[in-house]
Image (tube, rainbow, N blue to C red):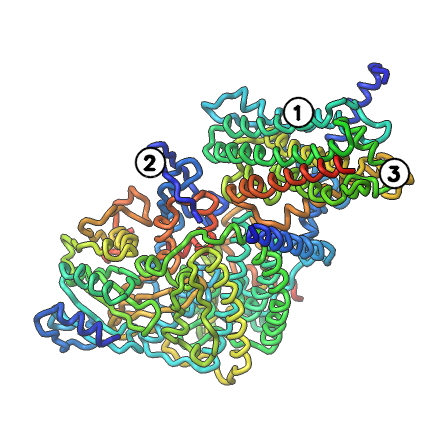
């Protein structure tokens, strides 16, 4: 009989403390971030989709079309090609397509590029109805960045 | 205490639990043959999220398998990275600098706390309590932000490389981790234990439910909190020390009852132990490089290699067979939940539907890790 | 009371409005209360502070198509949700909102309320059985056994109240409790009732929570086990009616508790009795319903039945005995 | 513990265990090592003992392991295409106590890959064997219900075979 009563008493006490805790939480301020109105700031090392780096003055991509990133990528998202440079000393990038639908953001391409030509962008809210919007042309994106920079 | 009840074998009906079911975290289907509300036979059916990671391992080079490791158990992705890095470093004989080992331990333990927090939230959700989920996610968000600062991603990390880690940790991360530990230690007794652990409804709901004996664990190969809840003192960080774990002193919580309450308490204590490890690792963090020298294209010597790592759910084993080429010849991923779930069929017999779900919640299942 | 047509018509419209507004905006209160407990904001986009949210939900539910699963008894399938709504609204006719606001003060109004409450239970049974879905059948069986188990202690505690106030008419019960909170049944000072009345208040409150299938006792529509219980197969307004029925049951439960124990429309200091005090009491009780729901996990079906048969019923019987003894003695 | 297991296992193979082969044997080593027990360095290979046995001895080894208190960690298959052989790896490990991991290997011809099941000794093997059958097509004799576990029931291919073309 005593077990029966003590169980009710301890049970009742635990229920009351439970209510007290949620009551105190009821009056505490809100912790959630109201997304559309308060936009989160991305940390410096955040991995968005990759983009080309251009050297400041000429605005040309640093890429020398060596294809290391194309080979490093586990899911073969990068496809690029270039043509001989007119002045004959290396190649110029003509096409750099990233298929972001297959990219798993592992960072092997950025790591394998030793000409400092690739980095992670910081935009995170990419949404679209059409899959082809995610077949991104990096060169065009670079030109837009250059155009809006000056 | 499942009342010994006489199950009429003929009047049973088959109830499909899943694959779209709120209680199975992911796409697990359990074919339950039921007699009224009692489970006569439970047979998990797998394969709804099977992606054949082992074939991908054979296709790509060693480094290219890192993104896959994080996609298997996305709750404790860093431990999977760590396991894969360990087995290949063992095979190819790559040295890892001291600082990288410490960073690996810190991030793996932080990820373990995040995984246990999410297990706790989802377990309470299975049992009907909705509010604890929000409190647990409030804490887990802090860890995810910390890890995002240094690894760049929030859930599926590809942070480790052979010979070290992708990039170094900075002082803001260290300060943030110390604040997080102080904050969680402050909230743990009130929000986690008073509100939930001592609650009579929860105690009645998971005490003596899903009794798993030590012998059953051994025969089914269950490891991790499921085994430690049944009295087996087996934690790979202690039994087969790897990385720099021998340098930290922490206990392995072991409970002998073997019921869902024991597994629950094991995980709650493990969160506390992980915080202790992180603090000691932060105090002893050495300087130096974070990336040892590793050849660009790895060709490990032919042979059979095995590495075991303690994830939040049990011992994750990588059985690697190399034939000297630049791709793994064969990689078998021994996933802990695959074995933990295999004992569900035997233990769930004669249970009520509600108890079977409480038992499944206490097993802490992550379905992509079972199906691989 | 003259029984002119206008009075009946006026009360009909009044009660339907009260029921409609309450059913819709209780959903809003629940989501806001739950959000605040979980330290988030809850609906705040539709209208000022989300007040238009129930309208939006209602329109959405109405615009959806009500699917009747194939090979199922269509009539019962359609009747079940309506049957869930009827008892909740009709029992409002008997509740005395205040001195002169009360649709009909019947002699045996307490009995009528409990008869209607069991119709709600039949609605769950029909809804569960008629959907032909295995989860719904399990949930129907659970719902019936739970309501049955919790009706008995509820009746026993109501008998103690009727013993004290001497009549089965809710209006008389409320009238005997007028004049200050020390007259309320829960604190009844004369002839020592305060000893037992708070026990019957607690038991009555637990049973009303269990009657409405909510909070720790929501075995009938247990999300994580039975998907959505007896409401699994219901689409648009079928589901809508079940939800409104549930919320109206909460309102009726709160009104009953307020009338029987907390002195109906009486002001705590006996100064300005009126319907607003009655509404304040109801909404405080409704908030505790919400508060309990978002604090506790769900019990298991056998624990729930054990709680009722092994704890609540013995306690309410003992309570009844002591109350009867006290009346005899003093 | 290691010695106890070593002694227990060695008496299973009457002929002398030729420890001539290097720690692990790759595909190119000449003499195929016949049955025997070899101690391998744990630091390098992650397992203490490496046992090669004939397919019919698999159950005997499993019973010894069960008696010694081991648990079955994993069963994996390897497809040696150039030697036209499948290899089944059984990983045994100790739950608690002194740590010792044993790798048991057995080889079956590729054309009719048949291995006796150990699921009656270790129920854990039930699912692992179904998975090996699912990916390689290795038949496990008198397995309780040898059906596919991960791939859809009507799949007619075995993906992890080296000659599998998607």
Label 3: state its secondary structure.
loop
Left or right: where B264 falls relative to C210: left
Image side of residue C161 versus residue B244, left or right = right
User: In 3D space, how far apart are the residues under numbered discs 1 and 2 (Cα atoms)?
Assistant: 41 Å
In this view, the residue in front, A37 or B121, is: B121
Count of marks, rendered view: 3
Q: Do callouts 1 and 2 mark residues in contact (Cβ within 8 Å)?
A: no
Q: Which residue is mark 1?
A: C86
Counting residues from the N terminus, which is met first, the one under dot 1 or under dot 3? 1
For the C terminus of chain A, give its image quadrant: bottom right
- Using the numbered discs, state the Cα–Cα distance from disc 2 to disc 3 in whole angstroms: 64 Å
The correct choice, above or below, for C232 with respect to C182 in the image is: above
Q: Nearer the viewer, mark 1 or mark 2?
A: 2
- Give D76 or C201, whichever is nearer the viewer: C201
Q: Position of residue B172 (x, y in %)?
A: 61, 75
The chain that hosts pointer 2 is B
| Crowd band around label 2 with a 10 angstrom C-alpha radius: few (<14), some (14–19), many (20+) | few
Q: Quadrant of residue B42?
A: top left
- Residue corresponding to mark 2: B9
Chain that bears disc 3: C
Q: Secondary structure at mark 2?
A: loop
User: Can residue A71 be seen by looking at this rendering?
Assistant: no
The chain carrying label 1 is C
Co-location on one chain, circles 1 and 2: no
C-alpha separation, residue under disc 1 versus residue under disc 3: 34 Å
Give the residue drawn at x 57%, y 30%.
Answer: C124
- Which mark lies nearer to you, 2 or 3? 3
C-beta proximity under 8 Å, tags 1 and 3: no
* Residue topped by disc 3: C179
The residue lying furthest to the front in this view is C329
The answer to whether residue B170 of the structure is visible from this angle is yes
In the displayed structure, would residue A56 be above or below residue A27? Answer: below
């Amino acid at each position: 009989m005593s077990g029966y009563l003590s169980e009710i008493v301890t049970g009742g006490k635990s229920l009351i403390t439970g209510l007290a805790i949620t009551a105190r939480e009821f009056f505490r301020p809100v912790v959630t971030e109201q997304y559309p109105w308060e936009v989160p700031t991305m940390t410096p090392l955040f991995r968005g989709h990759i983009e080309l780096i251009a050297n400041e003055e000429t605005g040309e991509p640093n890429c020398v079309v060596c294809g290391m990133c194309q080979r490093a990528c586990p899911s073969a998202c990068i496809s690029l090609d270039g043509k001989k440079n007119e002045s004959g000393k290396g190649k110029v990038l003509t096409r750099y397509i990233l298929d972001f639908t297959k990219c798993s953001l592992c960072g092997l391409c950025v790591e394998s590029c030793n000409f400092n030509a690739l980095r992670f962008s910081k935009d995170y809210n990419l949404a679209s109805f059409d899959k082809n919007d995610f077949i991104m042309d990096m060169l065009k994106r670079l030109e837009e960045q250059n155009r809006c920079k000056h | 205490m499942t009342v010994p009840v006489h199950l009429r074998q003929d009047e049973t009906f088959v109830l499909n639990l899943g694959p779209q079911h709120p209680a199975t975290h992911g796409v697990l289907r359990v074919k339950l043959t039921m007699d009224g509300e009692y489970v006569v036979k439970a047979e998990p059916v797998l394969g709804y999220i099977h992606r054949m990671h082992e074939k991908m391992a054979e296709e790509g080079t060693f480094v290219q398998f890192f993104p896959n490791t994080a996609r298997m158990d996305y709750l404790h992705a860093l431990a999977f990275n760590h396991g894969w890095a360990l087995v290949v470093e063992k095979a190819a004989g790559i040295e890892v600098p001291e600082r990288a080992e410490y960073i690996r331990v810190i991030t793996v333990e932080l990820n373990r706390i995040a995984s246990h927090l999410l297990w706790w939230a989802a377990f309470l959700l299975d049992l009907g309590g909705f509010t604890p989920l929000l409190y647990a996610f409030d804490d887990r968000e802090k860890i995810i932000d910390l890890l995002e600062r240094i690894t760049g991603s929030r859930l599926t990390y590809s942070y480790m490389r052979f010979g070290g880690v992708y990039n170094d940790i900075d002082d803001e991360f260290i300060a943030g981790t110390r604040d997080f530990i102080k904050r969680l230690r402050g909230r743990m007794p009130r929000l986690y234990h008073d509100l939930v652990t001592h609650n009579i409804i929860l105690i009645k709901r998971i005490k003596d439910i899903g009794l798993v004996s030590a012998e059953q664990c051994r025969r089914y190969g269950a490891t991790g909190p499921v085994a430690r809840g049944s009295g087996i003192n087996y934690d790979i960080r202690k039994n087969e020390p790897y990385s720099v774990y021998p340098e930290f002193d922490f206990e392995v919580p072991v409970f002998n009852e073997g019921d869902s309450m024991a597994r629950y308490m094991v995980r709650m204590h493990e969160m506390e132990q992980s915080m202790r490890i992180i603090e000691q690792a932060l105090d002893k963090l050495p300087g130096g490089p974070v990336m040892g020298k590793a050849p660009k294209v790895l060709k490990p010597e032919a042979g059979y290699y095995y590495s075991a790592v303690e994830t939040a759910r049990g011992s994750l084993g990588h059985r690697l067979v190399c034939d000297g080429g630049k791709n793994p010849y064969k990689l078998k991923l021994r996933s802990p939940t695959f074995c933990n779930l295999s004992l569900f069929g035997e233990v769930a017999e004669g249970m009520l539907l509600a108890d079977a779900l409480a038992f499944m919640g206490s097993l802490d299942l992550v379905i992509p890790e079972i199906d691989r | 009371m003259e029984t002119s047509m206008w009075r009946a018509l006026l009360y009909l419209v009044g009660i339907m409005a009260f029921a409609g507004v309450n059913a819709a905006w209780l959903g809003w209160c629940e989501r806001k209360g739950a959000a605040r407990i979980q330290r988030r904001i809850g609906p705040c986009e539709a209208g000022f502070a989300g007040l238009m949210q129930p309208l939006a939900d209602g329109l959405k539910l109405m615009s959806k198509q009500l699917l009747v699963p194939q090979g199922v008894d269509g009539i019962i399938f359609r009747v079940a949700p309506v049957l869930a709504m009827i008892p909740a609204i009709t029992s409002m006719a008997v509740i005395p909102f205040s001195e002169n606001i009360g649709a009909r003060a019947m002699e045996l109004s307490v009995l009528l309320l409990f008869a209607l409450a069991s119709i709600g239970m039949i609605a769950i049974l029909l809804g569960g059985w008629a959907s032909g879905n295995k989860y719904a059948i399990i949930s129907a069986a659970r719902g019936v056994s739970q309501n049955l188990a919790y009706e008995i202690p509820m009746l026993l505690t109501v008998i103690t109240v009727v013993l004290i106030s001497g009549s089965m008419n809710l209006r008389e019960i409320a009238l005997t409790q007028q004049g200050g909170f020390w007259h309320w049944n829960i604190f009844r000072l004369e002839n020592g009732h305060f000893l037992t009345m708070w026990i019957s208040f607690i038991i009555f409150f637990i049973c009303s929570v269990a009657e409405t299938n909510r909070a720790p006792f929501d075995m009938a529509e247990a999300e994580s086990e039975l998907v959505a219980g007896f409401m699994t197969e219901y689409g648009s307004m079928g589901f809508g009616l079940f939800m409104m029925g549930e919320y109206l049951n909460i309102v009726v439960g709160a009104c009953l508790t307020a009338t029987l124990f907390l002195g109906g429309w009486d002001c705590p200091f006996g100064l300005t009795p009126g319907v607003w005090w009655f509404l304040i009491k109801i909404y405080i009780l409704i908030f505790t319903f919400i508060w309990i729901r978002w604090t506790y996990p769900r019990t298991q079906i056998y624990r729930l039945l054990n709680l009722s048969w092994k704890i609540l019923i013995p306690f309410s019987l003992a309570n009844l005995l002591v109350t009867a003894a006290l009346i005899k003695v003093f | 513990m290691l010695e106890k297991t070593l002694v227990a296992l060695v008496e299973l193979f009457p002929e002398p265990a030729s420890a001539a082969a290097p720690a692990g044997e790759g595909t190119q080593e000449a003499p195929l090592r016949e049955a025997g027990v070899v101690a391998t360095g744990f630091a390098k290979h992650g397992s203490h003992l490496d046992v090669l046995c004939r397919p019919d001895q698999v159950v005997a080894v499993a019973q010894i392991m069960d008696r010694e208190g081991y648990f079955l960690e994993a069963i994996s298959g390897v497809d040696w295409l150039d030697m036209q052989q499948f290899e089944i790896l059984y990983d045994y490990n100790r739950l608690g106590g002194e740590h010792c991991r044993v790798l048991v290997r057995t080889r079956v011809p590729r054309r009719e890959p048949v291995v006796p099941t150990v699921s009656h000794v270790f129920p854990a093997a039930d699912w692992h064997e179904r998975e090996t059958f699912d990916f390689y097509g290795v038949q496990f004799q008198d397995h309780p219900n040898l059906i596919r576990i991960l791939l859809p029931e009507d799949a007619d291919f075995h993906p992890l075979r080296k000659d599998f073309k998607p």
